[in-house]
Image: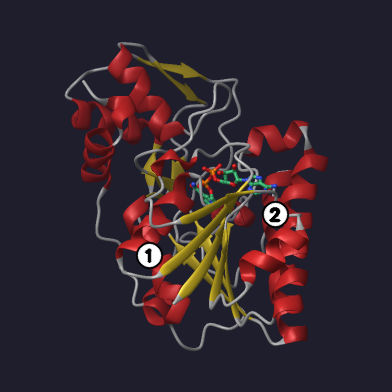
Amino acid sequence: MIFLITGAAGFLGTALANALAREGHQVRGLDDLSAGNPDGLSPAVHFVRGDVNDRPRLWSLLQGVDVVYHLAARVSVQESILYPREYNAVNVGGTVSLMEAMRDVGIRRVVLASSGAVYGEQQVQPLHEEMRPRPRSPYAVSKLAAEHYICTIGDLWGIESAILRIFNAYGPRQNLPPTHPPVVPHFLRQTLKGGSLVVHGDGRQTRDYVYVDDVVRALVAAATAPNLNGQVINVGSGRETSVRDLAAAVAQATGLTPDVIYSPRASAGVARMRADLTRARALLGYAPRVDLVDGLRLTLKRDPRFSR
Ligand code: NAD
């Protein structure tokens, strides 16, 4: 098959592109490199630097493509609070540009990497796809808007769409920006440096951490699974881990014992997150395989930034 992946030089995009190329598929990747780095891509992946809003570029990249994976996005919740216009332009505008270009070229299927962040604060766990989303940041709003655009434009023009709501993915090569880095690689780096781990709030807030290889398996399945049109599907580990327990898992995986400092005034975000995986199991045959400590060990082993 022939695939186009937007955001291909990012954390999830690179893992997905390399997995599809390993399976012998033809893979094209687009990324503006605002956050990504193409060095991790297999030479078998045809990489083009460009903006997802650049429709002429999309028209040529889309020729002959069977399935598009749309991953290009700005991905920081905190940054989105400061720059909502930018998040709207890239995450929403970029999605609309891509859908228009797909319509023009006659593409048949698109898979969107959406986010568990769209659920926001909910009274009931685990989170299932029929719950009313309560986005709490411009980032979450932008992902929810992208979901609606993908389904609506897809329906209008006969483009099959599948929405994967990915929870807290982690693994090798995850982007580690200087401000507001994702918690898993940040905790690993701090621990290896002998630094302390600063936990926001009381550390009892939970998240559903899912290893990148599990996410890639779900994404790959979404390219060919039947009966996906318009479906929203959670992709997580199905387990709830508090930030306190994450710090303990990092200690176990590294064999080190970092100091943990609590910052009670810092916002801890939503109280709980755990993905209900019933639909992912039924529609994608998905079952997470990698538990947290093993995933952290794999991350340490496979990411040169953590070599000791
Ligand atoms: P990432 O930042 O590593 O990847 C996103 C990529 O998109 C980057 O390489 C960036 O350069 C590229 N990009 C940004 N703006 C672009 C533009 N205008 N044109 C072309 N490329 C552009 O992040 P990631 O963690 O790999 O996330 C990939 C996708 O998965 C995103 O859509 C994100 O919202 C979604 N997602 C990720 C997670 C997670 O935990 N990693 C969870 C839920 C959803």
Question: Looking at the image, which residue is at 37% across and 56% down?
Answer: 18
Question: Looking at the image, which residue is at 21% across and 35% down?
Answer: 301
Q: Amino acid at mark 1?
A: Leu
| Left or right relative to 210: residue 129 | right
Could you tell me residue 180's position as x and y percent? 57, 27
Query: On residue 20, which mark appears?
Result: 1
Q: Is the residue at mark 1 in contact range of ligand 1, meaning its CB lies under 8 Å from it?
A: no
Q: Where is the N terminus found, in terms of image quarters? A: bottom left
Q: Which residue is mark 2?
A: 52
Q: Amino acid at mark 2?
A: Val
Residue 260: quadrant of the picture? top left
Query: On residue 163, which mark appears?
Result: none
| Left or right relative to 307: residue 188 | right
Q: Nearer the viewer, residue 192 or 196?
A: 192
The answer to whether residue 294 of the structure is visible from this angle is: yes
Residue 110 position (above or below residue 210): below
Q: Nearer the viewer, residue 108 or 155?
A: 108
Could you tell me residue 295's position as x and y percent? 26, 44
Query: How did the renderer colour the structure?
Result: secondary structure
Give me the C-alpha separation between circle 2 and circle 1. 21 Å
* Residue placed furthest toward the right: 85
Badge 1 marks a residue whose secondary structure is: helix
Q: Is the residue at mark 2 in contact range of ligand 1, meaning its CB lies under 8 Å from it?
A: yes
